[in-house]
Image (cartoon, grey):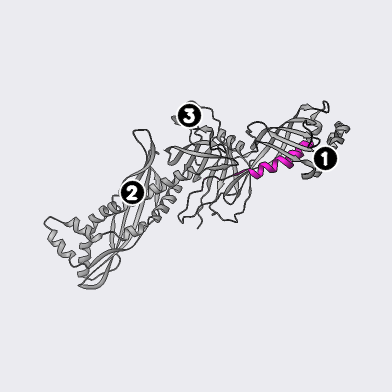
């Protein structure tokens, strides 16, 4: 069953500068009331809430409600004529989660629809009653004495004026009188019974949902030999949207923290959902750290003539223009070494996302040489793209360009490095780009479950929403092993 949801993964490339006293958190998971409703409904289903309703001790509640008083003995005599009284069917009509007027709290409403039946030895007919009552509760942020904030559900009770009990079928006069007496006893007893029996289940389902949300954020994101972990800091409810404020830690292959992002101010610049149910916002410096971890940071060494003979031929022709003697030195064991020098820079320019890298390129005539023929310093850029493979977000680069080339040292004399621009781009495209794309696989935390308990997959659409942010849409299609993928480009139209 697919829902018309469009989840949104927002890589918020937001500047880390302070605007007044407002600070953008490192990572924010924003959830609409629709997501809260679906997750809570699933947790209530997991706890078999309908079975709880069907097990309501109606007869006992009526006896307790009528005990004492002048009419107690009369009521007992009426109840003695009832052989059994129980809920035969029950359901929760569309669960509702709505923001309250102060925009800092959410109201949960659970309309209950039940059919109860009873019979008596005086009549063979089973009397069926249609019972409707609504339970409501408040979701808000509670702060403890130690300033630990968490989402809680409280003030669970029945909604005033929502109780209705009616007969499903016409009855004889005498049976109608008995049914009216039973209804008059159920009217005060049912709301108390629902509160005592259903509210604990509603609270337990909410705690299950809250726990799942926290567990989702704890799933490590593998980034080559490193990994990123998100740390829950605090929840915020703002304008009917639940925001989970998260810090981030980048770990190296030895499990040591190399970068820490947990700077959260008192006044937060929170993202808006813009009618999208779910959004993950990642601050620019965190996203840059992710991209840097995904890119190859070590040295690549390639026997060019063996691996890429056509590129080796082109290299020899290009060097021949500069120095024929040097070109003849290139043997079948010629080596190309590529080293990424610095952390990449992420820039948005006119609707395009680009990554800039500083790369050192060394050319060795043979594998026996200890000194390169020459060394180039390259300012390279790539267009960022994303696509989806089996519910994993894959970061890749459309192409790589040598924007500027500098001659760092040379054993064949000085020359204009621009003469090698084409072959340099070809080498980077043939060697560096496949290596970076092959390793650029990022598993985001799993999407929440729908009412059927199935997880939603990442989708196939990417849009810009401004000069400092990306939006990645997540669709309602469910994950499968054969999930198809489509490229998500950073050069989509502005919205």
The span shown in magenta is: 422-447
- Is label 1 or label 3 in front? 1
* Residue 84 on image: x %, y %: 24, 66
Which residue does the image show at 36% across and 33% down from the upper left? 146
Tell me which numbered mark, 1 or 3, is placed earlier along the sequence: 3
Relative to 321, 64 lies left or right = left
CA gap, disc 1 to disc 3?
A: 54 Å
Q: Which residue is mark 1?
A: 314
CA gap, disc 3 to disc 2?
A: 35 Å
The furthest residue to the bottom: 124
Instruction: Label 3, secondary structure: give it.
Output: strand
Q: Does the stretch in magenta take in 446?
A: yes
- Is label 1 or label 2 in front? 1
Relative to 403, 67 lies left or right = left
Relative to 168, 96 lies left or right = right
Q: Which residue is mark 2?
A: 136
Question: Quadrant of the image for the C terminus?
Answer: top right
Q: Which residue is mark 3?
A: 22
């Amino acid at each position: 069953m697919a829902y018309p949801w469009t989840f949104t993964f927002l890589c918020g490339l937001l500047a880390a500068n302070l605007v007044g006293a407002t600070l953008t958190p490192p990572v924010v998971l924003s959830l609409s009331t629709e997501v809260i409703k679906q997750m809570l409904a699933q947790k209530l289903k997991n706890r078999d809430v309908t079975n709880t309703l069907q097990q309501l001790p109606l007869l006992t509640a009526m006896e307790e409600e009528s005990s004492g008083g002048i009419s107690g003995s009369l009521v007992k005599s009426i109840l003695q004529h009832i052989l059994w009284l129980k809920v035969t069917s029950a359901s929760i009509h569309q669960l509702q989660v709505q923001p309250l007027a102060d925009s800092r709290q959410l109201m949960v409403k659970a309309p209950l629809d039940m059919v109860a039946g009873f019979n008596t030895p005086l009549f063979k007919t089973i009397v069926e009653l249609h019972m409707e009552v609504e339970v409501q509760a408040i979701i808000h942020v509670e702060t403890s004495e130690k300033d630990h904030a968490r989402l809680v559900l409280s003030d669970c009770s029945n909604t005033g004026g929502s109780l209705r009990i009616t007969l499903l079928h016409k009855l004889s006069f005498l049976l109608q009188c008995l049914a009216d007496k039973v209804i008059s006893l159920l009217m005060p007893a049912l709301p108390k019974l629902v509160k005592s029996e259903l509210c604990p289940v509603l609270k337990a389902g909410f705690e299950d949902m809250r726990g799942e949300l926290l567990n989702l954020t704890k799933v490590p994101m593998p980034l080559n030999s490193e990994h990123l972990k998100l740390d829950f800091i605090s929840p915020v409810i703002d304008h009917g949207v639940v925001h989970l404020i998260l810090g981030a830690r980048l770990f190296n292959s030895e499990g040591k923290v190399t970068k820490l992002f947990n700077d959260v101010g008192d006044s937060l610049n929170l993202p808006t959902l813009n009618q999208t149910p779910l959004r993950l916002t990642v601050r620019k410096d965190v996203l840059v750290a992710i991209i840097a971890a995904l890119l190859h940071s070590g040295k690549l060494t390639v026997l060019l003539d063996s691996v890429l003979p056509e590129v080796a031929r082109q290299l020899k022709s290009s060097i021949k223009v500069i120095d024929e003697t040097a070109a003849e030195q290139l043997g079948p064991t010629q080596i190309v070494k590529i080293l990424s020098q610095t952390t990449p820079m992420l820039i948005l320019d006119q609707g395009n996302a680009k990554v800039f890298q500083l790369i050192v390129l060394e050319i060795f005539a043979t594998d026996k040489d200890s000194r390169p023929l020459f060394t180039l310093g390259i300012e390279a850029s790539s267009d960022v793209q994303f696509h989806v493979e089996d519910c994993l977000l894959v970061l890749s680069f459309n192409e790589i360009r040598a924007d500027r080339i500098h001659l760092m040292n040379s054993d064949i004399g000085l020359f204009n490095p621009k003469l090698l621009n084409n072959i340099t781009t070809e080498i980077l495209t043939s060697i560096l780009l496949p290596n970076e794309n092959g390793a650029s696989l990022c598993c985001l935390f799993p999407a929440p479950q729908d009412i059927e308990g199935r997880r939603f997959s990442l989708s196939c659409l990417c849009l810009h929403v401004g000069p400092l942010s990306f939006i990645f849409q997540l669709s309602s299609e469910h994950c499968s092993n054969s999930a198809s993928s489509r490229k998500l480009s950073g050069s989509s139209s502005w919205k």
